[in-house]
């Protein structure tokens, strides 16, 4: 997993609430292997027409937004299915941060396993950021994970919350499995005591 | 004396292996279900050189990619679909997991199979790489969906780091009217609280309506907790749950049953336990529901009309409603009961159990569907039970296709798709844009309502059929 420290990059506004994971990546692509990459499939049916040509009106196909590395979305982004492919598609396209008022719970957890930073800010501020990005395509946002701040194109700085452990994992670039395997002793001890009590499992 | 605790609090604390200073808890996982969408997780495990820690706690069945026309693996024509099903079987064999394979009558949708086999039990923590894992909470378990990395984590460690969600209780009291089913209750709940209403919470469903409901209805309600934004939904286990489990293949037996029962009997929310949020619904006010938009919260009584975006409280909501109506090709003010449909799908982890098929068959008996329609039982055993009761014959006489078990047209990953522009009356759980196929238009409803829609060729109030002898 690639560590995340800070990022100053172009951001794309996606001002539609409840963007579900079926829209981030349609189910018909899920059989593919992780290593084959999913970036070209991100927002597939919103981004491409039936013949596979880019839809000119979709925001990611417009000048100034194509090379965005930050998405500024609306409430409940990533709701729906547990498919981690949604996070993989964002990461493989080059997105490292999603800013939104709220996220689907499973999507939110999946982000941290892949070095994608989900940032929750007040809905009003997120709407203001989207408006700024719409007014001036190609505008940058600057994210500093260490300081837990988002700097907008207007120069205003917002602080965001993140669990200390998740922050550490992102800064270093480690996933949960390696960390948990260090606790194998605790796991075995718990299992022994638990199974003595819950014998019927 | 211990502080008052909710059912969820009790299960959570009894599974905590470690608590990190930041509050995240390493939870022990009792049951892990894997399916044919779990291939990437098995590959992650392999890449890290790890093996499955507890093959005895891990159960596998293919469901998402299986053909519903035939359960002969060779009959899956598309190599990528055949490949993922074959991969699951190979991974399960290599790791020594219990596998309900395509050739096994116990195969089916993972969320139908777990309860049916007695694998899903009160007090357990159950996970699966599928957001509808909440289903198993109907038996008093804490059950939630996880992503591929977390599946790999559970395979490797039989444990998972989670931050504790908040407690929410949804109380439904009173008696449901004829023609009103569990699906109507959960759609009414989602219409009330919204698709983000339960985000960050675990929902406990309570009240006399839920208590009076059979396990299959409770499974339907818990199943759609994720559509209400909650990662898990649960019902405190009671005599109905114990009677359901008794004698099932993986339920405890003999002295173990007595010990289990004593343990399960304590799995209630204490009377003075605190919930962070409570919502009350009156069962008498719930009527048959259908969705009109592209989010499950866009649900309304069948007696209502397509809403007008002009009446939305703000510009953002107006735009979002207008986009949904454009996609669904609906005009404000149209009575929902006048919307013509092109096809009907009865199935999915929400509504493919025997009680669902019986409810639909009751409406279909002696009548004909006027649009293409299919019924897909949730498991091989549900299919066999329906056939023993003659329900398959009712469906077939009504013009329905009678298929093999699988996820099928709920998500279309096996090729059972709704064509672009077609309108489908569906008992599944998501009416998202493109969910049942690119350009497909989905209306969610109960099996009885889907059966009524098949007969009428349009969205229809099933209560007009209810008085028939």
Image: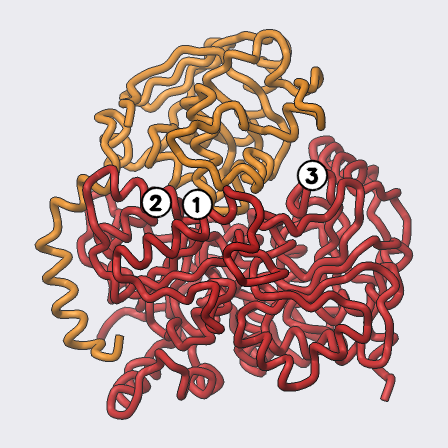
Chain colours: A orange, B red
Q: Which residue is mark 1?
A: A106
Callout 3 secondary element = loop
Pointer 3 with pointer 1, Cβ within 8 A = no
Pointer 1 with pointer 2, Cβ within 8 A = no
**Residue farthest along the front direction in this orientation:** B74
Mark nearer the viewer, 3 or 1: 3
Chain assignment, label 3: B
Cα–Cα gap, marks 1 and 2? 16 Å
**Residue B178 appears in the figure:** no
Q: Percent position (x, y) of residue B381?
A: 53, 76
Q: Nearer the viewer, residue B459 or B74?
A: B74
Marks 3 and 1: same chain?
no
Q: Percent position (x, y) of residue A70?
A: 47, 19
Would residue B191 appear left or right of B48 to someone viewing this image?
Answer: right
Looking at marks 2 and 3 on the same chain, the residue that comes earlier in the sequence is marked by 2
Q: Which residue is mark 3?
A: B438
Q: Which residue is mark 2?
A: B41
């Amino acid at each position: 997993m690639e560590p995340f420290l800070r990022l100053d990059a172009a951001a794309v506004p996606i001002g539609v609430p409840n963007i579900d994971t079926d829209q981030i990546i349609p189910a018909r692509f899920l059989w593919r292997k992780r290593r084959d990459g999913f970036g070209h499939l991100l927002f597939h049916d919103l981004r491409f027409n039936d013949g596979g040509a880019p839809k000119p009106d979709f925001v990611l196909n417009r000048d100034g937004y194509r090379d965005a590395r930050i998405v500024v979305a609306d409430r409940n982004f990533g709701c729906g299915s547990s498919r981690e492919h949604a996070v993989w598609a964002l990461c493989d396209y080059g997105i490292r941060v999603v800013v939104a008022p709220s996220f689907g719970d499973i999507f939110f957890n999946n982000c941290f396993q892949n070095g994608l930073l989900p940032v929750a800010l007040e809905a009003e501020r997120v709407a203001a950021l989207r408006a700024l990005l719409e007014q001036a395509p190609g505008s940058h946002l600057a994210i500093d994970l260490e300081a837990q701040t988002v700097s907008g194109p207007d120069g205003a700085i917002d602080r965001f919350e993140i669990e200390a452990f998740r922050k550490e994992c992102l800064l270093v670039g480690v996933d949960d499995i390696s960390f948990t395997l260090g606790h194998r002793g605790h796991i075995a001890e718990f299992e022994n005591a638990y199974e003595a009590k819950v014998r019927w499992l | 004396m211990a502080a008052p605790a909710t059912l969820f609090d009790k299960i959570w604390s009894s599974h905590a292996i470690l608590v990190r200073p930041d509050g995240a808890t390493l939870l022990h996982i009792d049951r892990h279900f894997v399916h044919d969408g779990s291939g990437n997780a098995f590959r992650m495990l392999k890449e890290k050189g790890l093996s499955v820690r507890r093959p005895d706690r891990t159960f596998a069945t293919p469901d998402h990619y299986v053909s519903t026309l035939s359960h002969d693996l060779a009959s899956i024509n598309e190599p990528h679909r055949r490949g993922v099903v074959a991969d699951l079987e190979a991974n399960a064999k290599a790791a020594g997991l219990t596998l309900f394979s395509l050739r096994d009558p116990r195969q089916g949708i993972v969320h139908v199979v777990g309860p049916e086999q007695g694998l899903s039990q009160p007090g357990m923590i159950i996970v699966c790489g599928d957001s509808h894992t909440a289903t198993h909470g109907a038996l008093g378990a804490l059950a939630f969906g996880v992503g591929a990395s977390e599946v790999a984590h559970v395979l490797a460690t039989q444990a998972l780091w989670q931050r504790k969600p908040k407690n929410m209780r949804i109380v439904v009291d009173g008696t449901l009217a004829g023609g009103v089913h569990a699906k109507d209750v959960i759609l009414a709940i989602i219409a009330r609280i919204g698709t983000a209403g339960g985000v960050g919470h675990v929902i406990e469903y309570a009240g006399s309506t839920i208590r009076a409901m059979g396990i299959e209805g409770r499974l339907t309600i818990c199943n759609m907790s994720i559509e209400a934004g909650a990662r898990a939904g649960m019902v405190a286990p009671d005599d109905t749950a114990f009677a359901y489990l008794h004698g099932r293949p993986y339920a405890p037996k003999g002295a173990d049953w007595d010990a289990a029962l004593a343990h399960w009997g304590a799995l209630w929310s204490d009377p003075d336990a605190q919930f962070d949020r409570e919502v009350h619904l009156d069962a008498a006010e719930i009527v048959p529901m259908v969705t009109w938009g592209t989010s499950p919260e866009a649900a309304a009584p069948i007696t209502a009309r397509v809403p007008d975006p002009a009446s939305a409280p703000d510009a953002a909501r107006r735009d979002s409603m207008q986009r949904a109506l454009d996609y669904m090709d609906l005009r404000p003010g149209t009575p929902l009961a006048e919307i013509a449909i092109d096809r009907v799908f009865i199935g999915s982890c929400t509504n493919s159990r025997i009680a669902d098929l019986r409810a639909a068959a009751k409406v279909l008996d002696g009548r004909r569907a006027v649009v293409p329609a299919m019924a897909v039982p949730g498991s091989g055993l549900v299919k066999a039970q329906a056939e023993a009761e003659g329900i398959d014959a009712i469906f077939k006489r009504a013009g329905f296709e009678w298929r093999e078990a699988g996820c099928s047209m709920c998500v279309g990953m096996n090729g059972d798709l709704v064509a672009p522009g077609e309108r489908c009356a569906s008992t599944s759980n998501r009416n998202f844009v493109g969910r049942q196929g690119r350009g497909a238009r989905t209306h969610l409803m109960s099996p009885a309502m889907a059966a009524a829609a098949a007969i009428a060729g349009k969205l229809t109030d099933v209560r007009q059929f209810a008085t028939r002898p």
